Image: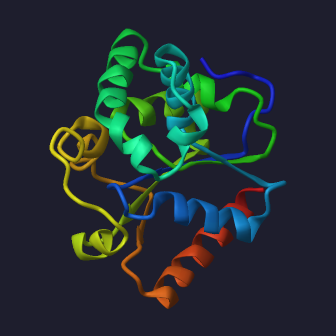
Amino acid sequence: MAPQAGAPRLVLLFSGKRKSGKDFVAEALRSRLGADVCAVLRLSGPLKEQYAREHGLDFERLLDASTYKEAYRRDMIRWGEEKRQADPGFFCRKVVEGVSQPVWLVSDTRRVSDIQWFREAYGALTQTVRVVAPEQSRRQRGWVFTPGVDDAESECGLDDLEGFDWVVENHGDAGRLEEQLQSLVAFVRSRL
C-alpha cells in the first residue's frame, strides 16, 4: 500500500502517446502552481534508475530525450514489464517515496495497473488526465513510429480506457492549451 507520511491532497495521473506533451503539460501546470505545491513524478525515473544499475548504464543519460535512451528503450520496456509482472506496484511505490508536496503530477502513467494502484492507494484524491495530440503534431515534435515501442503496452495500454477525468488537447494551439491549463489550475486550487 501507499506510504502514510506525506500523503497528498491530490494526485493527477497524466497519460498519452509518445510526444503528445505529457511532460510539457505537467511542467506547465507545476510552473503555474509552484514547486512548493506540486511535485512532478515520473514512473520511468525509478525504472530507468534500476535498469541502469542492473545493466551498467548512465542513469542521467537515460532520463533525457536522447538517442542514448532510444537505443535502450525496447529492452527497458521488456525489462520493466518483467518487473511489473512480478509486482505491479513496484515503480508506483518507488516514485512516491519521500514526496512532501500536497499535489502529485505523475507525468507518465502508461498502464491500467498504474491507475489501479494509485486509486487503491489514494482513492478519490486520484484524477486521470489524458493528453492528446494528432500524429502530425507528434511528428513535428520528433515522433517516428517505432515497432516494438509504439505498439507495446507501454504506449497502448490506456488507449481504450474511457472516462478520463480530464482530456487536454495539445495540438499546437497555445491559446486553447492555456484555457485548459487554467481550468486544471482552478481545479487543483479548489482541492488545497
Q: Is residue 157 left or right of residue 181?
A: left
- Count of residue discs: 0
Q: Position of residue 50 (x, y in %)?
A: 54, 20
Q: How is the image coloured?
A: rainbow
Q: Residue at x 50, y 36 (%)?
A: 44
Q: Is residue 43 above or below residue 185?
A: above
Residue at the spot 21% in from the left edge and 38% down from the top edge: 152
Image: 188 above or below 94: below
- Furthest residue to the right? 36
Q: Residue at x 43, y 87 (%)?
A: 173
Image position, residue 135 (x, y; %): 23, 69
Q: Quadrant of the C terminus?
A: bottom right
Q: Is residue 173 above or below residue 59?
A: below
175 relative to 117, above or below: below
Locate the N terminus by quadrant: top right
Q: Is residue 157 left or right of residue 169?
A: left
Position in image of residue 142 (x %, y %): 34, 66
Between 52 and 80, the residue placed more toward the observer is 52
Q: Pick out the residue farthest to the top.
A: 86
Front residue of this view, candidates 73 and 11: 73
